[in-house]
Image (spheres, rainbow, N blue to C red):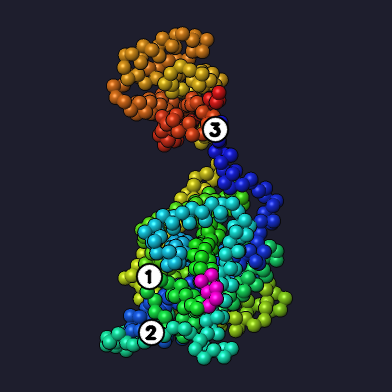
């Protein structure tokens, strides 16, 4: 018994949701935190290590700057979170940086914001999955040679889960997200107790810290400051994903904006608690990054060393680090399709990217993201460290544009009097108190993130950041090209100044290409006879034997062929489509110039889906060729071949 494609789809994806259930698929704060905040929360698994890896270029002694730099990053995070809370409250329909920039700065800046975020979401998936695979290979080194296949498998599973719907993916991702937070916070708490000697422990850490010494190289003041800035820029990977909630406000249960803003605050508290906690403990333990083991793995192993059940906590953290790093890619899966739908709605991406599938998710965006992220994984060989220089550029550009957009919006609000409202291109603003200090914070945030963007460009350009610097303008060019195409199509289809006399006449002819006389062609011939008084069956003969055979069959069924003219074209080559297309073009352009002619294509369709690949390829290719002729109308007449 054959299994239809429809049944397979239902088994994998589930039954379709009607539109009226859309409100029930929205997320509460618990699920939304797991869906949208997994990226910034999971960034703590490698943000501290990213800072330390750069500081090591100065010397091991420079690792003492890890905590101050982490605190500077945390301050920047607070500025960005404040700005995005304002974005959520003033733009409750979602769209984040793209919508804010479009409304306040114009088309071109908004396209740069959109392009920057799209690249960031692609890298979110690639980096998160690669980092998750690294977490598990740190615990099981034997799996390292299989990093790329494991990463691609993870992307496939994430794609499948997201195609099943937002609410279902939120339920699946909630458990590992919260278990990761609990495991790391518990590890940090135990580490703090052992470091400080709380509860009377005189020797809190049962290891001898490595001696921290300079590498002996001479470091100039300029180079020293340069590397500090570079380390700070590396730590800004902790900011990735912060904007996700502002893009997906409409995924929350009502009241959408308030729930989204509360979730943003909770996300900031959890993410920064983990970031500062990990950095402090790692600094106090004098741990040093190495390629064979992540810094989080080192910290957990050191803290749990000698504790009853310590091995359980170690593997707890490692397993759920792997899971949340992989599931952090879900931030990209949520926001890439949503942002793509906003761009598609405005005509900058293919229209089909704004269509939602059976489970009320943007299938086109999800599948597109999975394909591109998989290619990035293969190119960079699932090495998240190699991808990190590309990672924060896009998000910093979008942060800077978004906060400057909010700076301008707050300036417009400041001119309103109590009770006044103003409708912008996208939203409606009202008078509100405290606009001066809100505007000031947005201005500072925009300036700081722009400076960080410049630092990232300067420090990471040769490491791969040039790829993003090149990709973003190319994407903007692609957006404009697509928009120009849609504008041209709309103009060409417009009914303005329409004159019915401009319509082409319908020629009284129907051409039926045939390869044999059977039930499929008989149905097509009969259908063509109802359309036109002049029906031609066209056959391409490549040999005298085939010509004789078709003539005999034609004469055998006079009740079918009566009134239909059989036109046989002798052709000595194997490409039968070329003479067929040439004859149809001749009829359209020479015999009936300025008129529409009809081509009726017979095809038989096997009931079993897999068998369809065995047939109708000639008919498919013919349709593709004829679609380039604007004076040819193509009609398919299918004949279903049922299974026995």
Label 3 environment density (alpha carbons within 10 Å; few <14, some 14–19, many ≥20): few
Front residue of 54/334: it is 54
The residue that label 1 is drawn on is: 292
Residue at disc 2, secondary structure = loop
Q: Which comes before the other along the chain, label 2 or label 3?
A: 3
- Image coordinates for residue 260, horizontal then vertical, percent: 64, 68
Q: Which comes before the other along the chain, label 1 or label 2?
A: 2
Residue 2 circle label: 3
Front residue of 529/305: it is 305
Q: Is residue 604 left or right of residue 575?
A: right
Quadrant including the N terminus? top right
Task: State how far apart marks 2 and 3 are (Cα).
Answer: 65 Å
Give yes or no for contact between labels 1 and 2 (Cβ–Cβ under 8 Å): no
**Corner quadrant of residue 220:** bottom left
Q: Residue at x 67, y 78 (%)?
A: 432
What are the residue bounds of the magenta stretch? 307-312
């Amino acid at each position: 018994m054959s299994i239809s494609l429809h049944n397979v789809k239902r088994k994998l994806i589930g039954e379709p949701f009607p539109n009226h259930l859309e409100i029930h698929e929205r997320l509460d704060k618990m699920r939304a935190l797991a869906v949208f905040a997994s990226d910034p929360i999971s960034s703590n698994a490698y943000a501290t290590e990213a800072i330390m890896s750069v500081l090591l270029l100065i010397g091991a002694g420079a690792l003492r700057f890890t905590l101050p730099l982490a605190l500077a990053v945390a301050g920047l995070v607070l500025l960005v979170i404040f700005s995005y809370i304002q974005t959520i409250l003033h733009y409750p329909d979602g769209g984040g940086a793209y919508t804010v920039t479009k409304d306040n700065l114009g088309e071109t800046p908004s396209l740069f914001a959109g392009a920057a975020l799209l690249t960031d979401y692609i890298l979110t998936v690639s980096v998160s999955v690669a980092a998750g695979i690294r977490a598990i290979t740190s615990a099981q080194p034997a799996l390292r040679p299989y990093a790329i296949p494991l990463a691609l498998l993870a992307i496939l599973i994430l794609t499948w889960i997201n195609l099943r719907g937002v609410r279902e993916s939120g339920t699946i991702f909630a458990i590992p997200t919260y278990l990761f937070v609990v495991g790391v916070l518990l590890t940090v708490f135990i580490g703090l107790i052992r470091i400080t000697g709380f509860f009377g422990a005189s020797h809190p850490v049962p290891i001898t810290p490595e001696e921290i010494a300079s590498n002996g190289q001479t470091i100039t003041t300029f180079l020293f400051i340069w590397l500090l800035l570079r380390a700070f820029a590396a730590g800004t990977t902790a900011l990735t994903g912060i904007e996700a909630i502002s893009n997906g406000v409409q995924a929350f249960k009502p009241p959408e904006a308030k729930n989204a803003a509360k979730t943003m605050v909770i996300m900031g508290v959890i993410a920064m608690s983990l970031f500062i906690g990990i950095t402090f403990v790692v600094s106090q333990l004098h741990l040093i990054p190495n390629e064979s083991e992540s810094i989080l793995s080192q910290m957990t192993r050191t803290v749990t060393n000698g504790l009853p059940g310590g091995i359980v906590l170690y593997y707890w953290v490692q397993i759920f680090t792997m899971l949340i790093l992989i599931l952090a890619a879900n931030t990209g899966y949520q926001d890439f399709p949503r942002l793509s739908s906003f761009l598609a709605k405005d005509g900058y991406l293919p229209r089909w990217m704004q269509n939602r599938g059976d489970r009320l998710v943007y299938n086109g965006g999800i599948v597109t993201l999975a394909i591109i992220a998989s290619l990035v994984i293969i190119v960079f060989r699932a090495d998240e460290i190699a991808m990190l220089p590309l990672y924060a550029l896009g998000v910093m550009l979008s942060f800077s544009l978004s906060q400057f957009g909010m700076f301008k919006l707050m300036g417009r609000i400041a001119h309103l009097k109590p009770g006044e409202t103003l409708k912008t291109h996208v939203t409606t603003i009202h008078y509100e108190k405290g606009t001066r200090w809100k505007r000031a914070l947005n201005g500072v945030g925009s300036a700081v993130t722009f400076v960080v963007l410049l630092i990232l460009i300067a420090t990471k350009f040769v490491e791969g950041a040039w790829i993003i610097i090149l990709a973003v303008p190319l994407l903007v060019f692609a957006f404009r090209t697509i928009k120009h195409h849609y504008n041209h199509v709309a103009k060409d289809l417009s009914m303005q100044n329409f004159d019915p006399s401009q319509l082409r006449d319908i020629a009284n002819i129907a051409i039926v290409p045939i390869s044999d006389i059977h039930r499929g062609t008989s149905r097509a011939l009969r259908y063509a006879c109802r359309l036109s008084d002049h029906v031609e069956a066209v056959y391409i003969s490549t040999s005298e034997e085939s010509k004789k055979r078709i003539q005999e069959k034609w004469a055998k069924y006079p009740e079918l062929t009566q009134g239909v003219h059989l036109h046989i074209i002798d052709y000595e080559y194997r490409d039968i489509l070329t003479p067929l297309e040439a004859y149809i073009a001749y009829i359209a352009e020479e015999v009936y110039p300025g008129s529409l002619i009809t081509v009726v294509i017979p095809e038989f369709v096997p009931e079993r889906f897999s068998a369809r690949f065995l047939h109708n390829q000639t008919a498919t290719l013919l349709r593709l060729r004829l679609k380039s002729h604007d004076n040819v109308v193509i009609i398919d007449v299918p004949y279903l071949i049922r299974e026995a």
